């Protein structure tokens, strides 16, 4: 099989397309012929060696494989060769207190993360546990499923599960042009919220408006906090959806109304921030951490996409062989939604 591999950490130039032996499934495992896999900013951190996950070299990145089951290991039941599936990114233990209580993203003893502890999705075939498989409903294409997996899974987990967003509330979404930003606009709208969003570009705000954004703020020319207050009668928003870090984290806190909650899942613009504690406790704010999502949340999201209630945003597709070019586009941030690699006739 073909696989995109790097032997040293660095920029997109370290990626090589190589021929590797097909993986063979052990007990409880399957292999999947990958037809589509989406790019994530996490892949850049993994490639650069700054992900804070242990990565052994050489390595194949990619955390969102979609395709068809190719081979079944011993003892796998309920699945057949050819089934169309997405792979949940964590091989959870199924036994710890978090797995048993519907919080499997917190599993204390995962076997691996796809694309981190095991070879990733930038390849023609991946191996995973049968327990990681999620069936893709009719009405969702392979490319759409790949583009939705982490974007909508994360947005759902952050807004619905962690921040407990309710109809009638107001939300501020950072960077609406990103994969998880464009997904959050749709999930928030679907939940009945009034949605305010930021971007550095007018065309991205316009596209997000088509997805349900009520108010767009260009953070390169407008003051985010001032604009949020202007559109909320000076009160601020109930929920801030934050995935950038850096100064946007403080802007998010300053945009909250009293008793508001900021939910955060990323920090690419700055991992360590100053934090003003006084207004935080006097205004009874909450900061809520959020880490990926659970399989049942992803199944919900797939159903909503199949029904047309949520719309995956595919910015571009590239053949697997052009993974370096695809990563360069992602790092340029000159796109809206998700970038997807295709292989084996996937489209
Ligand atoms: Zn577990």
Image (spheres, rainbow, N blue to C red):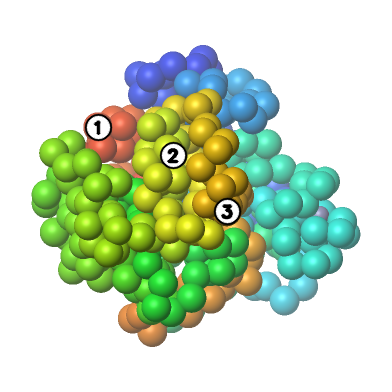
Please name which of the two marks, 1 or 3, marks the residue nearer to the observer.
3
Q: Is residue 171 left or right of residue 76?
A: left
Residue 249 is marked as 2
Question: Can residue 19 be seen?
Answer: no
Q: Check disc 3 and report its element: helix, strand or loop.
A: loop
Q: Residues within 10 Å of mark 1 (few under 14, many from 20)?
A: few
How far across and how far down the image is residue 341, in percent?
A: 36, 47
Quarter of the image for residue 344 reads bottom left
Comparing 150 with 103, the one in front is 103
Q: Give the spatial CA distance, label 1 vs label 2.
A: 22 Å
The quadrant in which the C terminus is found is bottom left
Q: Which residue is mark 1?
A: 332
Q: Is residue 244 above or below residue 260?
A: above
Q: Residue at x 39, y 78 (%)?
A: 168
The numbered disc on residue 284 is: 3
Quarter of the figure with residue 229: bottom left
Residue 49 as seen in the image, left or right of residue 319:
right
* Residue found at x 87% / y 56%: 96
Q: Is mark 1 within 8 Å of ligand 1?
A: no
């Amino acid at each position: 099989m073909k696989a995109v591999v790097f032997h040293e950490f660095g920029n997109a130039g370290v990626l090589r397309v190589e021929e590797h032996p097909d993986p063979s499934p052990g007990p409880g495992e399957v292999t999947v012929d990958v037809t589509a896999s989406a790019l994530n900013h996490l892949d850049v951190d993994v490639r650069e060696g700054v992900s804070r996950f242990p990565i052994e070299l050489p390595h194949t990145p990619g955390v969102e494989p979609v395709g068809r089951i190719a081979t079944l290991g011993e003892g796998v039941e309920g699945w057949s060769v050819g089934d169309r599936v997405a792979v949940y990114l964590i091989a959870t233990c199924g036994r710890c207190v978090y797995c048993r209580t519907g919080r499997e993203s917190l599993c204390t003893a995962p076997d691996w993360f796809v694309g981190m502890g095991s070879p990733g999705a930038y390849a023609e075939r991946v191996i995973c546990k049968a327990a990681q498989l999620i069936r893709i409903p009719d009405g969702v294409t392979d490319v759409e499923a790949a583009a939705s997996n982490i974007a909508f899974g994360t947005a759902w987990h952050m807004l619905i599960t962690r921040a407990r967003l309710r109809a009638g509330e107001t939300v501020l979404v950072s960077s609406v042009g990103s994969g998880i930003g464009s997904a959050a606009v749709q999930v928030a709208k679907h939940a009945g919220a009034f949605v305010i969003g930021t971007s550095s570009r007018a065309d991205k705000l316009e596209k997000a408006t088509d997805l349900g954004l009520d108010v767009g703020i260009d953070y390169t020319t407008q003051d985010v906090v001032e604009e949020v207050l202007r559109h909320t009668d000076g009160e601020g928003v109930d929920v801030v959806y934050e995935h950038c870090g850096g100064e946007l984290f403080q802007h998010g806190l300053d945009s909250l109304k009293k008793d508001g909650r900021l939910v955060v899942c990323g920090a690419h613009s700055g991992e360590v921030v100053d934090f003003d504690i006084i207004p935080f406790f006097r205004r009874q704010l909450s900061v809520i951490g959020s880490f990926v999502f659970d399989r049942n949340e992803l199944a919900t999201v797939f159903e909503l996409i199949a029904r047309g209630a949520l719309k995956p945003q595919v910015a571009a597709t590239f053949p697997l062989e052009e993974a370096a070019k695809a990563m360069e586009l992602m790092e340029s941030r000159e796109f809206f939604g998700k970038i997807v690699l295709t292989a084996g006739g996937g489209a």
